[in-house]
Image (cartoon, grey):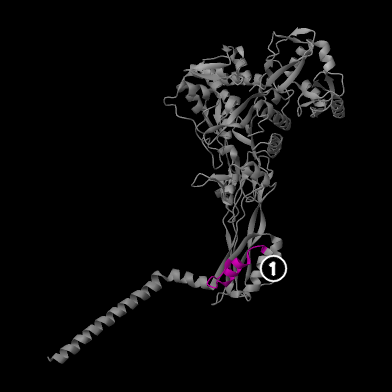
Amino acid sequence: MSALHLRLKRRLIIALFLFTLLFIVLVGRLTYLQVFASTKLMEKRLNQLVASIPITAPRGDVYDRNMEILAKDATSTSIYVRPKDIEDPEKTAEILAEILEIDKKKIYKKLEDTSQSIVLIQRKVDNDKALKLREKNISGLEFGEDKKRYYKNGNFASYVLGFTGTDHQGLYGIERQYNDILSGKDGSLTYQRDARGSKISNGTETRIDPIPGDNLRLTIDTTIQHFAERAAEKAMYENNAKRVTIMVMEPSTGELLAMTSKPDYNLNNPREISKIMEQKLSYDFMREDENGKKIEKSLGEKQQEMWKNPAVSFNYEPGSTFKIITSAAGLEEGVVTPESQFYDKGYIVVDGTQLKCWRYPRNHGSETFKEAVQNSCNPVFVEVALRLGADKFYKYIDGFGFGQKTGIDLEGEEAGIVPPNKDVSNVSLGTRSYGQGITVTPIQLITAISVIANDGILMKPRIADAILASETNKVIHEYQPEEIRQVVSKETAHTLLDILESVVSEGGGSKAQVPGYKIAGKTGTANKVIDGKYIDGKYIASFIGIAPVDNPKVSILVMIDEPNPSNYYGGQIAAPIGGELMKDILKYLDIPPTEKKEIEENEEIEKIIVPEVRNITRNEAAEILASNKLGYSSTSKNGTDIIIDQSPLPGVEVNINTKVHLFVKSSEKENAQKSEEKVMVPNVLDKSIQEAHKILKEKELNIEISGSGIAVNQDPKPGEYINKGAYVSVKFKTIE
């Protein structure tokens, strides 16, 4: 065979091989397209022929425990455009920007993007705005069914409910915690379009209806929540406080009946920061830059700060309210009984360190443990903690749930800070016995205190009560009370409850009394810690209450953050708020008073707020008091004398016709007549303002008052001789 034939044959073989290879590739590709990729290709083809607009599923309604609506959906509209069908993008952008009140340039950019078949312009558009757009008959404009979350009372229970985002998903509060239950399944509206991507006017449309979410019933009672919010608002403004948090719990179940913090935010416009919020949280709205300089936070950072729920996230030293925990531990372990005798010197020395009582340099002297709780005597609680020892004391700190999250069904809960028990010093043990060196959250504290009202049993706090079917409200699932553990015995709980009742009836919580009812409680005042340091002039005033003592139905917490430093004691400002709140709640729950006659007599008497009459003449003061249905008594008969003090003090609620004692400086003539006679100064220490005034008046002496509460210091001292008519300066202080 010639060389030419060989070359031809080789070429034919190569050509045949290439042809065969090409054939195999084509067959393989065709097989892949026909068999394996057919589904995807069909989907792409359908996507070219059809387009879909989502239909937002309704979220479930949120109700209170009595089926009062708190949150529900309202209909709204989503605005879409088909860029290829827009005839005049410039004019369309102008119309949309004007009606929807959004940026024209951003809209125009979307209208110019013809690579997209359909583009979202805005969600949750009010129906009246959507109607205006419909009337414009703009080609290429699509209107989708949407939902907008509506909160019945705006700011009401804002930190409980939370709110939803633009995608209708829960962001905070119950809305976020139970988002999977409240969220439904979105539907869609599908329509045909041509090769250009434009909608076929006479084409078919397919609608898939959305599936609504389930409803949720809460443990919150709308009426009690209103009481709590009103009380918090009052406490914030009366005391010029930074913030006030109030909670109400049913001790036997752990159910929250109310939870509020003021200032708060409007759930229907949750991104707006009110002026009062800006003012009250001015410090929290600042941060340090990389150089340590304080600068203002961004809007987003401020909003994050505003949305935090203080009831579950705020860490603070509880002060004297924590003495309830120390008392429970001491009684349970038998290191103390209500009748145990103590002697208070005004301080106690622990390992060379002097730990003072709140009334130092004065002391309480001889007192029983029950009286020590009434007096809130720090040294006694230090002694109890030392008797317990660190291991046993920490056993009860842990047992009551401090240093750990309660597990409440709200996001953002903090665990508080309990320093470890390892090598804890006696001094640290002593300070922790009265609520220093340990931090708690409000939800931890009310949950722990409710143990004393629930026979010593710790319950898990909760806000969700039941899941309900979307259309029928039939119960799908009901949440049950969850018992955590027995912390102290039933006997210890009852003993301590009796002691705490005496705190309100006889001790520092007296301003929380409700006529006809036995209220147990404890006040607290603590220096505030900021950036790891105690700050002078910044305090947290608290009151814990349980009622009625014979059969506890509610426990409450009132916490006033940074009240006016001129009057910051818990017994003076938090206890009255707690008493008013408790009175409203007990009446609403129709709980009969222990002494029915007493309550009826008190309800018949009209109450009056004592006006300010200091620094004006006696005659002017008399006129003001008369116009307010109040009488007066005075240390002077001269109508032009200037009033230097009064009792009761301004702002105190009293019965009509109560006499207000007016204190004035005597005239020179009166002083000259009395200056020749000497009198021994009586002892008015530990007396009230009225008692001290009466004792001094009997000796023909005048009183100069500072503070309020009981007398802790006087000048001149008891036993000294001074002229009749002279002044005795007496300093008063409220018991904590």
- Name which residue type carries label 1: Arg
Give the secondary structure at mark 1: helix
* Quadrant position of residue 523: top right
Q: Is residue 281 left or right of residue 581?
A: left
Image spot of residue 690 (x, y percent): 76, 17
The answer to whether one can see residue 481 in this image is no
Residue 375 position, x and y percent, is 63, 18
The answer to which quarter of the image holds residue 699 is top right
The residue under the point 67% across, 63% down is 100
- In the image, residue 416 sits, relative to residue 712, either above or below, namely below
User: Badge 1 is on which residue?
Assistant: 134
Q: Position of residue 134 (x, y in %)?
A: 69, 68
Residue in the picture at 76% in, 8% down = 679
Q: Residue furthest left?
A: 1
Q: In the drawing, does residue 346 fall left or right of residue 665?
A: left
Range shown magenta: 100-119
Question: 368 or 660, which is in the foreground?
Answer: 660
- Examine the rendered structure and indicate whether residue 356 appears above or below residue 161: above
